[in-house]
Amino acid sequence: MQRRFLDAMTLVQENGRPDIFLTMTCNPNWKEIVDDLLPGQTAQDRPDLVARVFHAKLEDPKVQLLKRNFICEVGAHVYVVEFQKRGLPHAHFLLRMRPRHKMTNPDDYDKIVCAETPDPLKYPAMQDLVKNHMIHGPCGSLREKSPCMEGVPKKCRFRWVAPYNPKLLMMFNCHINVEIHPYVMALQIRLPNQQLVWFKDGDRMEDIVEREKDKNSMLTTIFEKNK
């Protein structure tokens, strides 16, 4: 595990940060699983069957994402398979796009990720898939003790619909969450009136104060924009 972690960090050092975080979770109602259950059995009773079907199913998205450039042209990637407490396997992918496919604005994001329920009249099959696999909850007034409920008064810190790619969701019929990692710049955090001030040895104090008093730092500019 340590060796693979270091390999993944080397990829980031050589190629840059990932652009997409994609999670695919096994659907216990896949036909390949349900058809092979014995009478009275559930998917939790057959971890061997579930793991085998998921392993076979995972080969298709790997081909679509990494060889056929289904979402974008991938320059580097890593993925790991994990198991939930209830036994369902899921895979996490980190994908880095090639420079010409980089997302630079909200329109680019919207071409890849959706976080709303489709129009039931235009896309009834898609709406069923979103309801079955991509709805976060229950929370809010339905379940105030949900882990996502925070603050006073309590509010859900997530959206109701987990972000997804419509084509991938239709193709694989399972929970397949697609998140974009936008560029993040770390801001210098400081207490009020304790920002850094730069001056030379010969500068007069009055001139320094006059020059700096109305100057915004990156942090205060962010605060003003967020108002």
Image: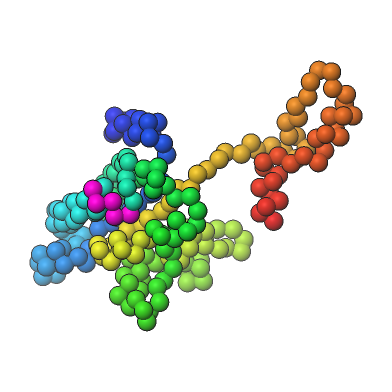
Q: Position of 102 compared to 155: left or right?
A: left
- Residue name at image x 32 percent, y 72 percent: 126
Q: Position of residue 107 (x, y in %)?
A: 47, 59
Q: Residue furthest front?
A: 100
Is residue 109 or residue 93 the one in the foreground? Answer: 109
Colouring scheme applied when the structure was drawn = rainbow
Residue 133, compared with residue 185, is above or below; it is below
In the image shown, does 179 or 151 lie closer to the viewer? 179
- In which quadrant of the rendered image does the N terminus lie? top left
On the image, which quarter does residue 54 sit in? bottom left
Residue 187 appears anywhere in the view:
yes
Q: Is residue 140 left or right of residue 37?
A: right
**Does residue 58 appear in the picture of this structure?**
no
**Residue 220 percent coordinates (x, y):** 70, 44
Residue placed furthest toward the right: 206
Count of picture labels: 0
Instruction: Please give the name of the residue rendered at 25% of the width and 63% of the height, measured from the top-left corner.
Output: 171
- Along the horizontal axis of the image, is 133 left or right of 57? right
Q: Nearer the viewer, residue 227 or 88?
A: 227
Residue drawn 52% across and 59% down? Answer: 157
Residue 197, x across and y down, in percent: 76, 30
Range of residues picked out in magenta: 67-71
Magenta portion: prevailing SS class: loop
Relative depth, front residue between 108 and 194: 108
Which image quadrant for residue 173? bottom left
The quadrant of the image that shows the C terminus is bottom right
| Residue occupying image coordinates x 77% and y 39% | 215
Q: Residue 176 lies in magenta, yes or no?
A: no
Furthest residue in direction top, as rendered: 201
Residue 175: image quadrant is: bottom left
